[in-house]
Image (cartoon, helix red, strand yellow):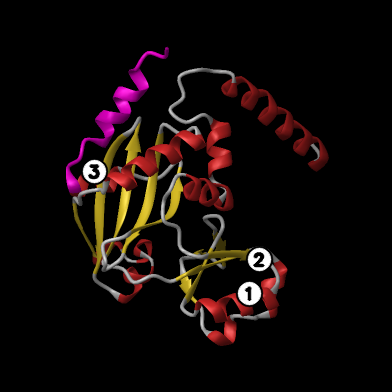
Amino acid sequence: MSQAEYEFAATEARRGFGGIINSLTGWINHPSAIGRAEYKPYQLHHAVQAGLNVPRTLITNDPKQAKGWCARVGDVVYKPLSAPSWLENGDTYVVFTTPITPDQWGDPAIGRTAHMFQQRLDKEFEVRLTMVDGKAFPAAIHAHSDAARIDWRSDYDALTYSIPTVPQRVLTGARDLLRRLHLRYAALDFIVSPDGRWHFLEVNPNGQYGWIEEHTGQPISDAIADALTRKEN
């Protein structure tokens, strides 16, 4: 096929197959719900509505606005709105959470696309809260390197785990958030500050759970199997 024919055929295949699978029942998370929930502004909005604490956040492509906001907040990190990774010259690159310095606050490159800036919070530890049909499987993530303390995904070897007690207010908010997002399964990330407050960072509708199960022994796979085999009303 020519390139034009190939692009047409690929679009038709996606529409045909996608239309069929979207009409099926029995999903833990429906594909359309996953698609909506992956938008960070959308999930942050509903997290606030669900009563969860959310760090001060700015999404903008205006360098002047970014500079003024960062100056008011003070300690700020940049976080990608997606989960970008790419190959370049045979190497794989991933964008992690990155602290930004005052000389970067008004960088003209901010004008090239949307950027998300968030207040940097002091951490006692972080939590990956895996939820399956309302059941909660919390794992405290303790970072033991400078890189892991900024973004634990950047240094898995420097992490240890424990099982924390989830405050009822957080658990109620997490369940309400998933109800709002029409998700039966999700992995929610939190920062727990030294004063014990839980701060919501994001919800991952397809978040990984295998390594959490391995380190904590929590029966997440069993809960997913139960969810998959549960009869619909």
User: Do the residues under discs 3 and 1 have CB atoms within 8 angstroms?
Assistant: no
Residue 26 in picture, x, y percent from top left: 45, 19
Residue 91 in picture, x, y percent from top left: 50, 66
User: Do the residues under discs 1 and 2 have CB atoms within 8 angstroms?
Assistant: yes
The residue labelled by disc 1 is 66
Tell me the amino acid under the disc marked 3: Glu
The residue labelled by disc 3 is 213
Using the rendered view, name the quadrant where residue 16 is placed.
top right
Question: Which residue does the image show at 55% across and 85% down from the upper left?
Answer: 102
- Say left or right for 108 vs 59: right
Was residue 151 drawn as part of the magenta stretch in this picture? no
Q: CA distance from mark 3 to mark 1?
A: 39 Å
Span colored in magenta: 216-233
Q: CA distance from mark 1 to mark 2?
A: 7 Å
Q: Residues within 10 Å of mark 1 (few under 14, many from 20)?
A: many
Front-lying residue, 211 or 142: 142
